[in-house]
Image (cartoon, coloured by chain):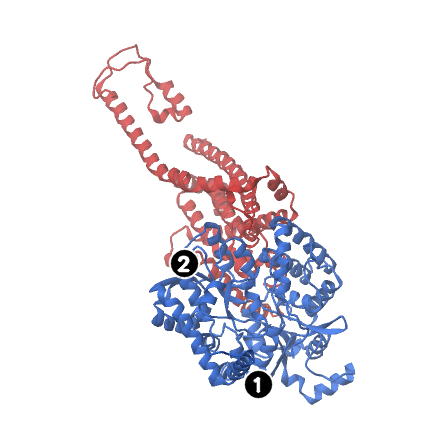
């Protein structure tokens, strides 16, 4: 029990508040200003109370963290982990649904992984997924960012625009697909509208040309998920500190320089977060592609999720499906780790910039 | 009382003749229903749960309710999903050996795969107990058998028939021009080449009239190819389960399949039934093979602009051994299959039999609003309400088609074989790969599937596959 009020403390014990223990730089900073104390000296009452309050606060934070984490860990251990382990089992055992029970499957070591990793069809599906995710993420971000920039200052009727802009995100992807199917026929309303506006006969086969099919879904994805980037970027703009912006304006920077040299650098971590979340989500897109194309025309839209679905639930190759899923998961983990690294770097840079701003450098 | 053999035969002949009289047939039909009720009455009140698409289920409901009144057995709830998604869901039930569903309404092509996965209950015992038989046209009932047992009761015949625009074909001016051009009369196509000539002759994109109304998308195109392959005398495997697509028959079928691109709408690579049926019914196409159910839409005088403007018949044939061989395909043949793991499987089996009786199936197929179920029963062919729906000529064509109906790849691994073929056909159709690459590549992929499923097992299944193929080249 920590002493209450003006008790006696053992100076040999680390009296550094736990919060500081977690932040070495700050702790060092604190020690610089700390007054050396002889062993077993009486601590004045206010200092002791402060330490006690700090300790209890730290415990509260710890409890809060565990309250949040515990259900997630339980969910992971109870639901996700068994599935992952079972999937791992299938990846190393050749099991055919038609021959015998799954627990009698033959152990084949890394054979299925080798098959998956050397398969051109899977390679193509990865490339298609990457192209789709990259294109749609950039599209979502550019439009979402632009809208957020226009909306981040209050103006009359802002709420109406806000509702309008987030509506697409509230539309179920399968509905987006079926509606798009009706709109995108060669002689459908979209081509017709473009023809009328441009004055030229516009006849793009959105749904049947294998060179365009993936772009079609990409455009639908952009329409569907731009609000996501918009919301994140709007929150990013709202969280920008006012001081640097005001300082820049006082120093005579025009709107472009304020945006380019102050707002954009401060927004970089948020931008990375928006890009990453959208990219990961786009890598897993399935409903629109399946509803519109089922992987076709030809194999033009056979992305990773489509191929995994076909393998597992059309070909009933459960073992191969499990291995494909693992490889896809590893791919995603690598991407996430890279992004986390970049985000950390951005955070450090931002912290350094904040410190510099505070010091007036 | 002793009955001589002669008397017995006489009696049999008499009964057979009697059964051709409509009234007598109805009396027999009633007896059939009574027998099923008698067999299932002892089970008692039971609420069944089925996996079935509501488009199919709605017209099956009235007869189910009648069965419930008579026996206490009815359907308490369904999982309403598309028939195209049920194979995967049913397989998931097989994996978990779940008793949750009592029956599945699914493509009969899945019978080998689902039976191999241990999900299905053979129905012969129940059918025998109720003295029920699947009284289908020709040998169509065989498409529900696998390894000598019956695994399902059909509700939807679903065969491809040939459709040609009568108003175009019988136009004197067109007939003259066609005869001048080709040196032969313009008539209902007998061969694939005949059909292509007709399609080319009338194909006129400027007038929004397209030669072909066939499907060539990735999911459906394969059905057409298999029909062409069978009619050219091809069969997907030899006796050792070695794929035999890359043969003369396979190549010729591929040529027929791909050349239609010249007379098809440019968006056909991405079109399925939701896009093609309105075009066909709307009279924007000339000649095609399609599921027989669309005859009902064509001939619906209130809704169709082309009612009375169609000729129906069997799909074109190809010369095999000096004879013209016609084949059609039944896919999906929608049937009720019973879950082996269900504690209510007996009740489900009798309900399936009930739906397969003439009385119930006539009501189901004859539904004018929900037109998903197509004719298959011998009794349907003389039914007034069904004749009215299809037209007399249309129903005659259906009857002929049922006699030459083939299954898709009727083996364990049906969906795997089918999708590999469909994918490569689609890639060739849109120009992603060359035509010459299709068949060798598919054979390569099929060989892998055979290895995975087990060549020994599939070799045993080949006997069933071959036994369900039609034995005649052309129906009488």
Name the spot of residue B257 as percent of width and height, x first: 69, 67
Q: Is the residue marked by circle 1 packed among few (<14), some (14-19), or many (20+) residues within 10 Å? A: some
User: Viewed as shown, does residue A169 lie left or right of B177?
Assistant: left
Vertical position of residue B116 compared to residue A240: above or below: below
Q: Is residue A97 visible?
A: yes
User: Viewed as shown, does residue A215 lie left or right of B187?
Assistant: left
Vertical position of residue B388 compared to residue A24: above or below: below
Please tell me if label 2 and label 1 are on a single chain. no
Query: Quick one: SS at disc 2?
Result: helix
Name the residue tied to disc 2.
Answer: A161
Q: Chain of mark 1?
A: B
Q: Colour of chain B?
A: blue
Foreground residue among B139 and B434: B139
Name the spot of residue A315 as percent of width and height, x first: 57, 53
Foreground residue among A63 and A102: A102
Name the residue tied to disc 1.
Answer: B308
Foreground residue among B436 and B400: B400
User: Viewed as shown, does residue B435 lie left or right of B373?
Assistant: right
Foreground residue among A206 and B67: B67
Task: Give the letter of the red chain.
Answer: A
Q: How many marks?
A: 2
Name the spot of residue B365 as percent of width and height, x first: 48, 75
Vertical position of residue B352 compared to residue A65: above or below: below
Q: Chain of mark 2?
A: A
Q: Is residue A211 visible?
A: no
């Amino acid at each position: 029990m920590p002493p209450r009020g003006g008790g006696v403390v053992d100076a040999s014990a680390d009296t550094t508040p736990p919060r500081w223990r977690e932040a070495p730089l700050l702790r060092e900073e604190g020690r610089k200003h700390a007054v050396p104390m002889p062993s077993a000296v009486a601590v004045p009452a206010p200092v002791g109370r402060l330490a006690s309050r700090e300790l209890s606060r730290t415990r509260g934070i710890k409890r809060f963290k565990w309250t949040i984490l515990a259900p997630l860990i339980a969910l992971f251990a109870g639901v996700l982990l068994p599935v992952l382990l079972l999937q791992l089992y299938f990846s190393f055992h050749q099991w055919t649904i038609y021959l015998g029970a799954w627990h009698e499957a033959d152990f084949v070591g890394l054979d299925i992984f080798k098959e998956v990793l050397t398969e051109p069809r899977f390679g193509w599906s990865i490339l298609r997924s990457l192209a789709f995710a990259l294109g749609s993420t950039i599209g979502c971000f550019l439009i979402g960012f632009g809208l957020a920039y226009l909306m981040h200052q209050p103006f009359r009727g802002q709420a109406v625009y806000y509702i309008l802009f987030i509506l697409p995100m509230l539309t179920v992807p399968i509905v987006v697909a079926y509606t798009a199917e009706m709109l995108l026929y060669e002689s459908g309303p979209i081509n017709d509208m473009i023809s009328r506006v441009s004055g030229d006969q516009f006849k793009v086969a959105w749904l049947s040309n294998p060179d365009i099919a993936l772009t079609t879904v990409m455009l639908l994805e952009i329409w569907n998920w731009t609000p996501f980037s918009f919301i994140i970027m709007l929150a990013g703009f709202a969280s920008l500190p006012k001081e640097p912006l005001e300082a820049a304006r006082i120093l005579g920077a025009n709107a472009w320089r304020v945006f380019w040299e102050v707002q954009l650098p401060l927004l970089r971590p948020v931008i990375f977060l928006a890009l990453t979340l959208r990219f990961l989500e786009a890598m897993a897109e399935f409903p629109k592609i399946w509803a519109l194309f089922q992987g076709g025309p030809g194999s033009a839209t056979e992305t990773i999720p489509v191929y995994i679905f076909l393998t597992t639930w059309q070909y009933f190759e459960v073992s191969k499906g499990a291995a494909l899923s693992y490889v896809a998961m590893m791919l995603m983990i690598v991407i996430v780790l890279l992004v986390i690294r970049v985000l950390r770097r951005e955070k450090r840079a931002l912290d350094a910039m904040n410190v510099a701003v505070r010091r007036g450098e | 009382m002793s009955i001589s053999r002669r008397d017995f035969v006489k009696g049999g002949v008499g009964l057979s003749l009697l059964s051709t009289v409509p009234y007598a047939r109805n009396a027999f039909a009633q007896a059939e229903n009574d027998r099923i009720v008698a067999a299932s009455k002892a089970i008692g009140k039971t609420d069944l749960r089925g996996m079935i698409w509501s488009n199919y289920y709605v017209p099956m409901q009235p007869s189910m309710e009648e069965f419930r009144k008579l026996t206490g057995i009815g359907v308490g709830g369904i999982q309403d999903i598309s028939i195209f998604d049920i194979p995967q869901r049913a397989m998931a039930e097989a994996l978990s050996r779940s008793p949750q569903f009592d029956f599945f309404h699914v493509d009969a092509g899945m019978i080998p795969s689902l039976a191999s996965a241990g999900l299905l209950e053979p129905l012969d015992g129940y059918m025998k107990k109720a003295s029920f038989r699947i009284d289908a046209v020709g040998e169509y009932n065989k498409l529900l058998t696998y390894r000598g047992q019956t695994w399902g009761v059909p509700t939807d015949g679903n065969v491809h028939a040939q459709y040609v625009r009568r108003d175009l074909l019988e136009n004197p001016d067109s007939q003259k021009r066609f005869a001048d051009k080709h040196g032969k009369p313009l008539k209902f196509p007998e061969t694939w080449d005949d059909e292509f000539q007709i399609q080319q002759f009338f194909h006129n994109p400027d007038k929004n009239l397209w030669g072909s109304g066939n499907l060539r998308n990735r999911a459906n195109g394969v059905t057409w190819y298999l029909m062409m392959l069978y009619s050219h005398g091809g069969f997907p495997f030899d006796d050792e389960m070695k794929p035999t697509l890359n043969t003369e028959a396979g190549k010729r079928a591929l040529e027929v399949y791909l050349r239609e691109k010249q007379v098809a709408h440019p968006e056909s690579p991405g079109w399925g039934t939701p896009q093609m049926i309105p075009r066909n019914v709307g009279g924007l196409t000339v000649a095609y093979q399609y599921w027989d159910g669309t005859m009902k839409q064509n001939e619906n005088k209130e809704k169709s602009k082309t009612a009375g403007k169609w000729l129906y018949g069997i799909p074109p044939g190809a010369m095999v051994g000096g004879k013209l061989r016609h084949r059609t395909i039944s896919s999906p043949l929608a049937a009720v299959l019973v879950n082996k793991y269900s504690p209510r499987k007996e009740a489900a089996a009798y309900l399936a039999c009930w739906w397969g009786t003439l009385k119930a199936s006539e009501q189901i197929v004859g539904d004018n609003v929900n037109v998903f179920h197509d004719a298959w029963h011998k009794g349907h062919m003389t039914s007034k309400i069904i004749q009215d729906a299809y037209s007399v000529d249309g129903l005659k064509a259906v009857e002929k088609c049922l006699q030459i109906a083939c299954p898709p790849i009727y083996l364990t691994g049906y969906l795997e074989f089918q999708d590999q073929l469909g994918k490569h056909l689609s890639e060739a159709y849109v120009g992603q790969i060359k035509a010459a690459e299709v068949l060798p590549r598919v054979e390569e992929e099929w060989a892998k599937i055979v290895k995975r499923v087990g060549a020994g097992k599939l070799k045993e299944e080949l006997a069933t596959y071959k036994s369900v193929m039609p034995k005649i080249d052309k129906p009488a």
